[in-house]
Structures are given as C-alpha cells and as structure tokens.
Image (cartoon, rainbow, N blue to C red):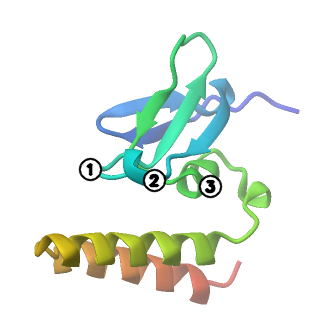
Amino acid sequence: MASDSRMVALGFGKFARADRIFALERITGEERGDGRRTRVWVDGVAEPLIASRTEITILRDMGQESAVAAPVLDEAMDLAARLAAAAEEGRVDLSDLGRRARRLLATTTSSS
C-alpha cells in the first residue's frame, strides 16, 4: 500500500498528514460544541488534536470512504444537532446551515 502524504484540514487552522493520523474519536455530550467535533490522534503528537470537522469528513479527506458506514445519516444528525443548539441559543446562522445542507444534499445526489 502506497504512503498517502496528502494534508488533511482539521479546522482551526490545523492540518495533519493523512498517513500520520491513526485514530479519530467523535466528541460527544457537553464537550462537543463551539466547533469541537473530533479528537484526532497523530503519530508523533503526544495529545490528540481537537478538530472542528467531523470524523466522517476527515476520513473522506484521508481517502477512507470505505471506512464510513453511514456518512449521510451522521452528517444529517450533526446538522440537526447544530440547528437545535443554535435555535436554543437564539442565534441561527442560516448561511452556514444552508451551506451545510446543500453540501449534504449534494452527497446524496452525486453519482460516483
């Protein structure tokens, strides 16, 4: 298997080489929010990095589409959770939510 040295955007201005990422963990509960979506373990870095992107998106960027079991459902649930949290706080960013919804819909209609 060839080494994949592509850079993967983690958000918050952080990037990691795809071939150095060895574990992803979805952040849940009260720890999740304010852009905190995923813990990313990178070879050579003692502590996990906090990514603002979901593990599914990171896996896709790593070229690991086959590792993603139900990407559309997970992204839809993430979008719904963001909308619910924003509505509770009274600060719904329709531009951001619309962009995310269009991207999600595009993944369900694209022919691979």
Farthest left residue in view: 90
Q: Residue 35: where, in percent of width, then height?
A: 31, 50
Q: Quadrant of residue 14?
A: top left
Nearest to N terminus: mark 2 or mark 3 = 2
Q: Nearer the viewer, mark 1 or mark 2?
A: 2
Residue at label 3?
60
Q: Which mark is residue 34?
A: 1
Q: Which mark is residue 29?
A: 2
Task: Identify residue type, mark 2.
Answer: Gly
Residue 47 vertical position relative to residue 17 in the rendered view, above or below:
above
Q: Residue 66: where, in percent of width, then height?
A: 79, 59
- Which one is in front, 102 or 92? 92
Task: Identify residue type, mark 1.
Answer: Asp
Q: Is residue 84 left or right of residue 40?
A: left
Q: Quote the CA–CA distance across marks 2 and 3.
A: 24 Å
Task: Identify residue type, mark 3.
Answer: Arg
| In contact (CB < 8 Å): disc 3 and disc 1 | no
Q: At 68% from the left edge and 28% from the top edge, which residue is drawn?
A: 19
Q: Residues within 10 Å of mark 2 (few under 14, many from 20)?
A: few
Q: At 18% from the left edge and 80% from the top edge, which residue is drawn?
A: 94
Quarter of the image with the N terminus in it = top right
